[in-house]
Amino acid sequence: MAQLDQFIQLLHQRQAQSIKLAGGQQVRLTVEGISNPMTKNEVSATQVLSLIKEIAPPDVAGQISATAQVRFAYAAPSGSVQVDLHHEGGAPVVMVTRADNGAAAPPESVATVRKVDTEARAEIDQLLSTLVDSGGSDLHLRVGEPPIIRIEGALVRQDGAPLEADRLQAMLESIMSPRDVIRYHETGDADYAYGVEELARFRCNAGRDSAGPIGVFRVIPSDIPTCEELGISKEVKRLCYLTKGLVLVTGPTGSGKTTTLASLVDVVNSERTDHILTIEDPIEFVHTSKSCLVTHRQVGLHTDSFRAGLRAALREDPDVVLIGELRDLETAAIAIETAETGHLVFGTLHTTTAASTIDRIIDQFPADRQAQIRVMLSESLRAVIAQTLCKKIDGGRVAAREILLSNTAVSNLIRESKTYQIPSIIQTGGNMGMRTLNDSLFDLVKRKIVEPKEAYMKSVDKAGFENQLQSLGINVTPLLK
């Protein structure tokens, strides 16, 4: 009897969705969207590979390795299952699902055993290494263009021949799981994470444009920066000690929202003894459990959607929930309800100011529900941190933040649909730790960290910021020529 048979028997008995075996983690069973450990101890990468080799057909077992991506059927004594081996962050991950669960069979274009193109993987690993070594944030790969790296906000073309479609396709697929390959071929898009050992993790997007395949890779640093390193104020850091409420970090794409959230979650992880549950697409910063227990769930891999994962989270005994993005009405509604019912919820939105963040959430709802949502949001919202990244004079980038901290006045304005008055509350709330974006930008200019032109371009209220610059004797007009 194979060692996995006892787990597979439980899979069938409990009508569970899946068993997950991952190197460095406990074996976990997912029932009705809830993932629970089946073992007390973690299993190593070697143990994971050994366990599935024991049940794999002879022709497949010989091809199982640290790089192979494999899918096969296994007739266990308790019933048939499908076994899917892929890799995340350099560690093997095996998903075992019941053959009777209605899962669609893989398309004929995806082989039972998909050998990884090791040359293509080595090539993309080298490009990712160049990205990290250059201090860049993003790598862009396009057909007909050499690799392009975003360094301090500017796109810089690298030396090298333009990429060809077939080679770029092989490079992208060499670091995808079988599930990602299927999604990429069916929809033309795939979001996933990839890790290079002793280098970094990367948030990856593969897609297509008129010329062929495209790929974008963002660096996720291995080390989580501290609040002090990011210039996060003590008032914002204090939010990590709340027992309930909604805290939103907002800003345009590439403004450092994920990094700010990671540093706040790390404070919780280090200084509290709670259960932190993250729902992301894909998983970016990986938090190792410290004083807290940390559970990472990825949309599309561990749960169908943000709203499904968030709904299931309420049955998983979390104290702190991180939502990668409040993408739709239902996710926003559940997030607010979760914050109201004794949980601290962190989330992100692609909005530029605190007032527009509140309006965006409320405007998602039908008119007949907006009054109710205003009341709920007025009671649950604890803070909005809206940020943007600016180029520093001496190289690198720094965040400028607008900080709204909820108080009675803010709650009343939200409830009474007077969010247009929130900027005035922020201006007069400096003693609480509130700050306008203009004040944050002005401080960076005064301290000679950011050039006046850069700060002016990042300002939302440019007329007001121009007046502030004039108080320093800086005339904006010549700067814009």
Image (spheres, grey):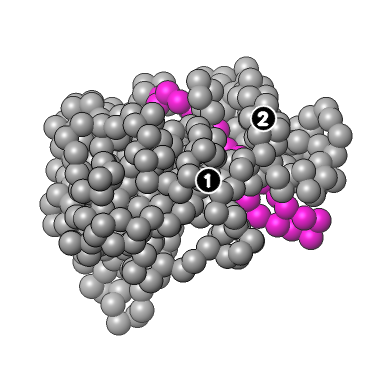
Q: Which residue is drawn at the image coordinates 63% and 46% (left, top)?
A: 173
Give the crowd class for mark 2: few <14, some 14-19, many >=20 residues within 10 Å: some
Q: Is 169 left or right of 15, judged from the image as shown?
A: right
Whether residue 41 is visible to the viewer of this picture, yes or no, is yes
The amino acid type found where label 1 is placed reads: Asp
Q: Which residue is drawn at the image coordinates 19% and 55% (left, top)?
A: 10
Q: Which mark is residue 419?
A: none
Q: Quadrant where the N terminus lies? A: top left
Q: Quadrant where the C terminus lies? A: top right
The residue tagged 2 is 122
Give the crowd class for mark 1: few <14, some 14-19, many >=20 residues within 10 Å: few
The residue tagged 1 is 59
Q: Which residues are magenta?
A: 206-225
The amino acid type found where label 2 is placed reads: Ala
Which of the pair 92/77 is nearer the observer? 77
Q: Which residue is drawn at the image coordinates 66% and 55% (left, top)?
A: 207
Task: Classify residue 33 by image quadrant.
Answer: bottom left
Earlier in the chain: of badge 1 and badge 2, it is 1
Q: Which residue is drawn at the image coordinates 47% and 41% (left, top)?
A: 61
Q: Is residue 215 magenta?
A: yes
Q: Is residue 372 magenta?
A: no
Measured as percent of width and height from the top left, residue 348 is found at 40, 50
Measured as percent of width and height from the top left, residue 323 is found at 34, 50
> Which element carries disc 1, helix, strand or loop?
helix
Measured as percent of width and height from the top left, residue 142 is found at 76, 46
Q: Residue furthest top?
A: 394
Position of 3 relative to 178 (above/below): above
